[in-house]
Image (cartoon, helix red, strand yellow):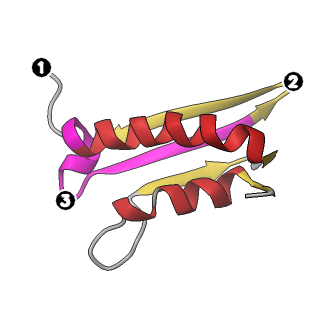
Amino acid sequence: VGTMTLHAFLGALFQPYADDEGRPRVLVNGDDAVFDDQAATSVALLFHELATNAAKYGALAQPDGLVHLATESRDDRFVLTWSERGGPAVA
């Protein structure tokens, strides 16, 4: 991995969830951040779990469902907001 950006890393991680024409179904927008390979495993585990759950039970389980991941740098914090649209109704 070396040093890369969060958005580039997540783009590669979410590639298997693209639609049949290769368009991403997990859309990442906002501030980007540089991180190194020490953080890659934790980031990959976290977002792999979220995407897997969305594919089984949430928006990615439906053909038209989408996930929006907003990233924002706020002072000394980096805020990530995962939002799903087009999934099954929540009971």
Is any atom of residue 90 visible in this view?
yes
- N-terminal of the two: label 3 or label 2? 3
Kindly identify which residue carries mark 2: 76
Outermost residue toward the top in this view = 91
Pick the quarter of the image with the N terminus: bottom right
For numbered disc 3, what is the local secondary structure? loop
Q: Is residue 34 magenta?
A: no
Residue 15 placement, left or right of 20: right
Give the residue displayed 30% in from the left and 36% down from the top: 53
Q: Amino acid at mark 1?
A: Ala
Residue 45 pos. (x, y %): 51, 37
Residue 4 placement, left or right of 75: left
Q: Amino acid at mark 2?
A: Asp
| Above-or-below relation of 11 to 39 | below
For numbered disc 2, what is the local secondary structure? loop
Label 1 crowd (10 A; few <14 / some 14-19 / many >=20): few
- N-terminal of the two: label 1 or label 2? 2
Kindly identify which residue carries mark 3: 63
